[in-house]
Image: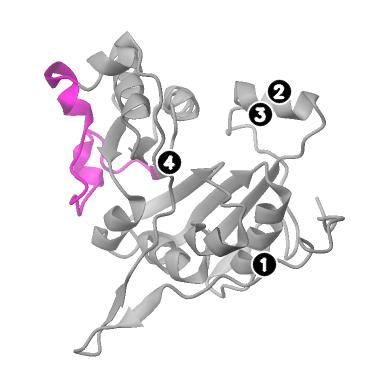
Amino acid sequence: MSPQNPSDPNQSNPDPAPSDSDQSEQGSVFYRWAPTFMRRSTHMNTSAKLGLTEPYQHWYAPITSTNLRELFAEPEHPLTVEIGFGMGHTLIQMAQSEPTRNFVGIEVHEPGLGLTAFEADRLKLTNLRLIKGDALKLLENLPEGHLDTVQLYFPDPWQKKRHYKRRFVSPERMELVIYALKTGGIFHTATDWEHYAFWMIEVLDSLAPLQNVAGSGNFHPRPDFRPLTKFEKRGINSGHGVWDLIYRKL
């Protein structure tokens, strides 16, 4: 699907993402990441509270993990990492529908972590593990070519211009994603914010190691394997757009 530029002249040409990198005194590159997520106070129901207790801790892996494949009984299966899975509804559905694929979800919000662990336990899933923390810290620990897929669904759009540096999709952050992906691996993202959609396609199309599966400058139709959330359905019924982007590492 070919994109149409937003009608707002202030949004039709997204400003390029600022650099987050710097040099240490020794000259080696390090990253001073601005947070890409906003800490929110969310109601935690009984199931979510249970999912954070000791009997459910086997669903969790440390953020310092350097080999996610060894978390699973079938480490040879394709491995997907979902960044910021929210309350986990999509992640749970995907793990259910693809039992021969392993999934690791990383999230900072405890209600989502707890509820997802509770549901994974209830469904007796064997192909799902969870990590609490900043995805960038996890990605920095992973070896090159470790992941088959990275998915980032409905990340915080950070609408104010002074906050654009917090958007996850930036050239510097995507370097970590690209490094962790195997050759032929997939990065899949989706947003319901038009300005962020065009920002992402501009950034991602400019990165040489990535190939836009739908063709340069194009968005991808929602694939069947990405479940519709109730909020997304509500937005579509109200006439709001949703934009998917799928890239392959060359």
Considering only vertical position in the picture, is 115 above or below 135? above
> Foreground residue, 52 or 34?
34
Asked whether disc 1 touches disc 2, contact meaning CB atoms under 8 Å apart, the reply is: no
Q: Which residue is painted at 78% across and 63% down in the image?
A: 10
Of the numbered discs 1 and 2, the one sitting upstream in the chain is 1
Q: Which residue is mark 1?
A: 202
Quadrant for residue 20, please give it.
bottom left
Considering only vertical position in the picture, is 75 above or below 213? above
User: For numbered disc 3, what is the local secondary structure?
Assistant: helix
Q: Which residue is painted at 56% across and 63% down in the image?
A: 162
Picture disc at residue 234? 2
Asked whether disc 3 touches disc 2, contact meaning CB atoms under 8 Å apart, the reply is: yes
Cα separation between marks 1 and 2? 28 Å
User: For numbered disc 1, what is the local secondary structure?
Assistant: helix
Span highlighted in magenta in the image: 53-80
Side (left or right) of 113 relative to 26: right
Cα separation between marks 3 and 2? 5 Å
Crowding near the residue tagged with mark 3, few <14, some 14–19, many ≥20 C-alpha atoms within 10 Å? some
Identify residue type, mark 3.
Glu
Q: Which residue is mark 4?
A: 84
Query: Principal SS element in the magenta part?
Result: loop
Residue 71, image x and y in percent?
20, 39
Identify residue type, mark 4.
Gly
Side (left or right) of 131 relative to 170: left
Q: Which residue is mark 3?
A: 232
Q: Is residue 231 magenta?
A: no
> Foreground residue, 158 or 80?
158
